[in-house]
Image: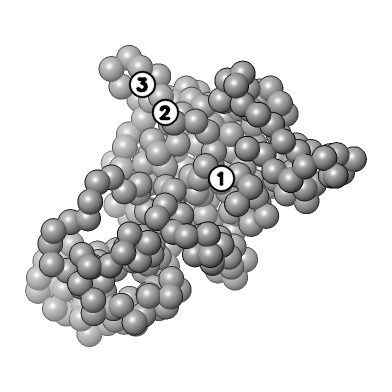
Amino acid sequence: MNTATNITDQAAVVSLSHICFAPDKKTVLDQLALEVPAGHFMAIIGPNGAGKSTLLTIMAGLLKPHSGHIDLFGRCLTSRSRRKLQRDIGYLHQTHGRASDLPMLAKDVVAMGLVDYNRPLWFQAFAQQSNHDTQIEQALALVEMSEFSHVDFRVLSGGQQQRIRLARALVRQPKLLLLDEPSAALDSRRQEKLYQLLRRLCDEKNMTVIMVEHDVAAITSYVDSVACLNKHIHHHAKRGETIPDEVWTAMYGDHVNIVAHDSSCIGCAPVANRQEGHHHD
């Protein structure tokens, strides 16, 4: 299996080596290695409990692995460097349960993603004179939620709330964007718009995007690579590369059904099999 996952010769935005995480002696991540360069759009797939959300949380510097080494933007992630490195990271975590009961406007939820949000009140008052309002407006425009800027976040639909959360992750214009199931609560049209936006941010802003998703067929024409994760990375498929049957079996078990995909997509079957089907299930 492929556990070393160099993608290109470019300098890595994220570099993980021998990452292990095993709370209560239960192995969640085991000897995981990964390198992702600037401007790369990578999806992470795998079954429930595979460690996908845990991996994103570790990359965000919010969870410390039990062993291994992490470099972000070419600098070692430590307790001393973490705060500074996090300034260049946008993170959308997976939502659980209902939204907060706090009466906040949509624009204020987005503002929570600003670097200065948790600074003392006197500093925030000074910062109001900066370009924070412009940053918030730009983030809302990216997710097509500008008209809801002054709407109570609690009355928004699930899909609208998810787009506001995405704007919060984007508001600081991060170099690295970590997304845990960002298409949750979005309809198919909005999902496609989301993937198009992320692709554009990679191509035009050189942003690195790492996204946990379940639907390979939906994302495969947008991403540059797909990492197959279950405790460690079993395979890292680049565009036009087939994900071997044994990798699917190792991740999901013998019950998985494998259907050929268009050969221009990630994880697809060779060109000769193009007529046989349309996607991996």
Q: Secondary structure at mark 2?
A: loop
Which residue is labeled 3 in the image? 22
* Crowd tier of the residue under label 2, counting other residues whose Cα lies within 10 Å: few below 14, some 14–19, many 20 or above: few
Q: Residue at x 44, y 31 (%)?
A: 48
Q: Is residue 16 left or right of residue 239?
A: left
Residue 44 on image: x %, y % = 54, 41
Name the amino acid type tagged 3. Answer: Ala
Residue 246: x percent and y percent? 68, 22
The image quadrant that residue 130 belongs to is bottom left
Image quarter where the N terminus lies is: top right
Name the side, left or right, on which 166 lies relative to 233.
left
* Residue at (26, 71) in percent of width and height: 106
Of residues 32 and 258, the one nearer the viewer is: 258
x, y percent for residue 47 = 49, 31
| Residue 66 seen anywhere in this rendered image of the structure | yes
Instruction: Please say if the residues under marks 2 and 3 sit with CB atoms less than 8 Å apart.
Output: no
Identify the residue position indicated by label 2 in the image: 49
**Which is nearer the N-term, disc 3 or disc 1?**
3
What residue sits right under mark 1 in the picture?
215
- Which of the two labelled residues, at mark 1 and mark 2, occupies the earlier sequence position? 2
Pointers 1 and 2 in contact (CB under 8 A)? Answer: no
Q: Residues within 10 Å of mark 1 (few under 14, many from 20)?
A: few
**Outermost residue, right side:** 272
Q: Which amino acid type corresponds to the residue marked 1 in the rendered image?
A: Asp
| Residue type, label 2 | Gly
Horizontal side, residue 249 vs residue 169: left or right:
right
